[in-house]
Amino acid sequence: MLRILRFRPANRYYSVKIAQKDVKKYTDTINLPKTKFPNRLTAVKREEQERLILQKKIAVSYQYQQEHLSEKDKPTFILHDGPPYANGQLHMGHAVNKILKDITLRQRVAHGQQVNYVPGWDCHGLPIELKATSAAAGQNALEIRQKSRSFALEAIESQKKEFSSWGVLANWQKNDIYMTFQPEFIENQLHLFYKLYEKGLVYRDLKPVYWSPSSRTALAEAELEYDPKHISPSVYVRFPINPNGLDITEKDTRLYALVWTTTPWTLPSNQAICYNSSLEYVLVRLSEHNQDELYLIASALLEDFEANTQIECEVVQTLKSRSLGDLTYKHLIDKDLNDLPFYDASHVQDSKGTGLVHTAPAHGPDDFLVSLARKIPVKCLVNEEGVYTDDAPSFLVGKSVLEQGNPLVLEHITNNVVHSSTLEHSYPIDWRTKKPVIIRASEQWFINTEKLKSSAADALEKVEIYPRANAEASKKALLTQLQKRPYWCISRQRAWGVPIPVLYCRKTGKVVLNKVLIQHFCKELRKDGSMDFWWAKSLEELLPTEILKKLGYQANDLVKGSDILDIWFDSGSTWSAVLKKDKVADLYLEGYDQFTGWFQSSLLMSIAARDCAPYKALFVHGFTVDEKGYKMSKSLGNVISPKQITKKYGTDVLRWWVASHGTQHMSITVSEKLLQQAAENLSKVRATLRYLNGAIGEKQPSQENIQDSSFLNRYLLSQLVDFDAEITKLYNAYEYNRVVASIQNFLSNQVSAVYVHLIKDRLYCGDERELLAIRQTLTHCYEELCKSLWPIVPFMVEESWSYYDTSGAAFHQQSVAAKSQWQDQNANDVVNAALEVKKIINQQAGDVNSWHIDVVLKVGNAKQLKLLQELHPMGKPRSNSELCEILQVGSVTLLQTADQDLQVSVKALQAPLCPRCRRYSLENAEQGTCHRCSLVMTARN
């Protein structure tokens, strides 16, 4: 070796050191893990790899399991897909939902169970129709439908491609999907509608329903959201009471009923005042008003009134509440109505207001029930645009009830306004337009939920709900929402949807509907391929003469219905169209918003049609938020899309994040920090798989099972049985976050820190039999890990498997199961006993290479001694026992002592270590390798 000491322009001086004799290298004799499975992939390579795996492996996996997995041992697992809306780009909520479903399906397949899963799309509804109508003004219904269908198909193709790219297990190749505008789906829906109509569960009636002026249609409860900061007027008004029938102690006084309202725009439709005969009422004098005026109010609400208005009250007289039924009052706006009634009603409470309720049957469910009981004709002065009709007072005609109604009415009755302020409260808004809704009476179609609630509640009691931690609260929420639902309005006043297949008598409005009509409409549907004929054909064109004769009508005596079915009727009937006949899904898996949506509509429809729940279990997941807990929105600029994640990190990282965070919280945080964490964790998993790939090499033809006495090998196999049982249990409980944690824990501890670390000497330097036994053990470990990982990260597993099984077979074609005979409690106890000793030695050894250490163990505990004796003989020191291997020390002497405490003493060995294995000491410096290594190399040569 030459070393330059110094440099001058004219002279060079060198020092020469004699080189030592080359040290012999043994690298070529060591069994180092070798694999072409890359440690990491570039973005370009990863994208190409995912495309190939999708194309060659995942694309055919659904069909393969249908053809090769039998129902003999396990019945087919049915996961019924809640249809996403066929509109717009996919977001993180879609990713959470579809990937959780896919993990659920894959884990069943991995355990040898056939699955049934048909992805679906909800294709009708207002958002698509609004997109169609915004494209051009003045379109007729047929044009709107054609554009809407085109928009929906375009969205479905885009979404389907992205769902498939996530590795979702479905028969994408055969396009085995369902869409709610498919002719066969609609035909099933029309028959179901008629079935419920025949049973008296579907009917038409005039009722107050939630009405969206911005959408010009009725809305179901599930189509509402709530604005928690809506501002409404908070007004106390007075209605003049006619003195007849009331015994007043103070004569020559004017009487008024004091009423509180937040909807002054409904006062023109007032038809009664309601009270509750179980409450106590008083007449009071108000400090800021004429002293000859007395006001009627519930005594329990006096304090509340004074606090809200700052008006002091003087109680003049207490009344018998039943006497209020004899009172009448004058309308505040319509002077011709001067003898309106007071009605006793249980919905009047003393929790707020005045104990007297302004009653407008056209604008309130409770008000409407009062009108039904009292046979009051309902008066509605508001049209479908939320505008006062020509029947309203002249100053209101043509005015918007929400924008102009309140101030105009208050101005008109200003002399009868006792106090006016505002109230911030939760108010229903249209879930699509985000605009306020009103309650408005109109002729609509309904499902009689009152007849279904009891059976539905009973059926729910038998339904399992996951996650288990929230099961009780989730079931209570679902039952509460079910009981709260007064009735289900299933008609909508739009063009893009399934028309309600009824005719009406032009003169009487009577519904004309029978089985012959339904069958004829279905025949037209099959012929045309859509329901467009409902709008395209006149009744003369649509109905053959023989059908008209059977109906007993002329074509011009009838009119077609103009309503369409609620999209919740569409999606609520998917079980009937997709699962067929009496099939019940094993699982519905959706977000918690579906308590008022799909979970409920499907339940009610199934109970109505066949008196059973459509599902055996429900899994409820949360919604995605940013790291600050905010809902993701474009306006906040906090949106992270699935495409961004898959492009940056790959599909498996997206799936790993979903599994890690998608099941345990109702707010699922999406952040770069968590995604980076997922990528790092998955990188560690990949590194372990790569190591195993290298250690076991390529899959060999079946060979005789090697009988192995190694406790470490037996220990790992036994741990695999426990691991498989734990993972299966967590998968079946849908606790995928714990699956991820268990996999990481098992890899870090039992696999890497214990087994792989401790058997490296045997793996790298051992003889052929030891190597085969280790490879056999690691192969079982590798297969079990692939089985546990495949449901979550199928791309990585299939990629790794391709380097193990070079025949081209995919992992989904394998049958992997931990064998019960691997369970070995003795091996567990023996290895764990040795590991406890190892902890003590590590503390004493410090930074010294432990293979240079000689250990003396003095053991007094009989059980501990017996376990350690399985690994090492008593008495003389030995260096080649399995206890030495586990403790990673050069030599061990095992002795018995009377002292119950374990005594450990360590000392350094002076002899050099074998240059090949760096484990065994050399007896003398001239010895090339240790005795073990010499035998191994000789056997190979």
Image (tube, rainbow, N blue to C red):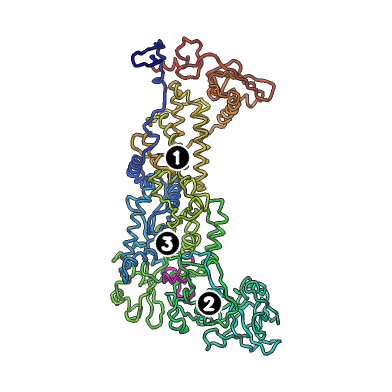
User: Quick one: 443 or 631, which is closer to the camera?
Assistant: 631
* Residue under numbered circle 2: 264
Q: Distance between the residues labelled 3 and 2?
A: 37 Å
Q: Distance between the residues labelled 3 and 1?
A: 37 Å
Q: In the image, is residue 543 part of the stretch drawn in magenta? A: no
Q: 285 or 670, which is in the foreground?
A: 285
Q: Do the residues labelled 3 and 2 touch (CB within 8 Å)?
A: no
- Where residue 40 sits: x, y (%)? 39, 36
Q: Mark 1 points at which residue?
A: 682
Point out the tag, 3 or 2, that comes first from the N-terminus.
2
The first of marks 2 and 1 along the sequence is 2
* Number of the front mark, 2 or 1: 2
Q: Which amino acid does label 3 sit on?
A: Ser
Identify residue type, mark 2.
Answer: Pro
Q: Which mark is residue 275?
A: none
Q: In this view, does 627 lie above or below 724?
A: below
Q: Find numbered disc 2 in the image and state the secondary structure of the residue it sits on.
A: helix
- Disc 3 designates what residue? 571
Q: How many labels does the image show?
A: 3
**Magenta stretch: includes residue 196:** yes
